[in-house]
Amino acid sequence: MDVPGAEHVAWKDVVTCRVRHDFEFLAAKIFMGRIILQLQDDSSPEAVARMASELRELFVKNIQLPLVQRDVNRIFNN
Amino acid sequence: MTQALYTIDEISARIKAGEALFLAGDEKRLAQLPPGQWVGGTIPYFMTAAGGAFDKEKIFATILPDYVESVHIKTYSKDTLGQVYMDAPGNGFSFINLPAACDTLLSFALNAPGFEQFAMTPLIGWVSGVDMTDLGKVSPRVFNGADASSLEDGAVVMHVTLPPGKGANIGIINIFEQGEGADIVFPADGFSADEVTVDGRPMKLADYFTENNLDTKLPLVADYYGAMINTSIQGIDKDSGQVAFFAPVFKGMTYRHAKPIADYIEHFTSQIPHDLSQHLVYSCNCILNYLYSELEGRKTGDIVGPITFGEVAYQLLNQTLVYLTIHDV
């Protein structure tokens, strides 16, 4: 399954909580908990881009799992 | 799934046969085992197929599936544990044992979310403990089976590589959810707190608990993007006003005191995913759930495993059941 690049606006929408998804993947939820705290301290465009890239990496590294694939579909098919 | 209590002789035979094992039991029993592909931690409490049990003679074993490609056991110190995610296999998972109350655990609890590659690969495990009557008298330990050594400060990790076509996933079952009370925000990360903000107003956390007659057996609960993550309350020092926790609270995170639970077993079993038993490899549950919900002799569905002084699902958790599943992918 192809995962869109980190520059895709959907990643930014997730990390900034502009769009919220009900993820199944526990790691993504815990990771998002950390991202939300970090962006409270630094919400610069650079920080948002870095978080978007890290979140994408989490999904790419676990994309073989069906529930991760379903979460990616949630991000890009909504 | 192969998780159950075994005799020393049975476990020794499995180790000698080259099986890869996660073990839990009394220190004296674990110390009798030969070297091999195993990691272990001390605890005498277990959830077995027959129900919650206390046993200092047998050892609880999780026998890893024979399709596991390879395992690598590594001991970490407080100063090297930040590497744990970097050392994880490309396809597989890492299983961690840490002793309760040691410096390495405190460091892991506070710093894991900032580790390089945090959560990129599955990290699951548990915090070893002791018989509750030995609290303060005996130190929990963890064992590196590769050389059958043990330590009371550090972490032992088994990195498990899975073959192509298999994938590992971590889940949790947490019966607690945020209650209807105030939003609590802490000014700093830490294992204790005094002044906090309660619904935006500065206040002593101890006063908030006292004034609202809140049950300290119920954890504080934070919402991690839909995952309810507990921080259990160790106690309130009435003189200093400090509230102590079994896991750290984090600055800026919003916590609420948990909603009361009428019946643990009923809530727990209703949350077990319907197909969990088909894929389940490992699970463990918290000593606080065992004690507060009086689980000795009672069953939690088909879920078995050691009863722990803390659970790890990527980071330290409290009052939560964690589990590992392996799927065909």
Image (cartoon, rainbow, N blue to C red):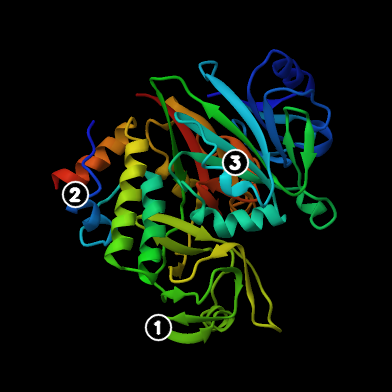
The foreground one among B175 and B65 is B65
Q: Residue furthest left?
A: A78
Picture quadrant where residue B3 is located: top right
Mark 3 or mark 1, earlier in chain: 1
Amino acid residing under circle 3: Arg
Q: Which residue is label 3 attached to? A: B298
Q: Chain of mark 3?
A: B
Q: Residue at x 34, y 57 (%)?
A: B225
Q: Residue at x 70, y 35 (%)?
A: B40
Q: Residue at x 37, y 34 (%)?
A: B274
Q: Residue furthest front?
A: A46
Q: Chain of mark 1?
A: B
Picture quadrant where residue A40 is located: bottom left
Secondary element at image label 3: loop
- Between circles 3 and 2, the one closer to the viewer is 2
Do the numbered discs 1 and 2 sit on residues whose CB atoms are within 8 Å?
no
State whether residue B142 appears in this view: yes
Q: Position of residue B316 (x, y in %)?
A: 56, 52
Q: Are marks 3 and 1 on the same chain?
A: yes
Q: Which residue is label 1 attached to? A: B200
Q: Are marks 1 and 2 on the same chain?
A: no
Amino acid residing under circle 1: Gly
Q: Position of residue B229 (x, y in %)?
A: 46, 57
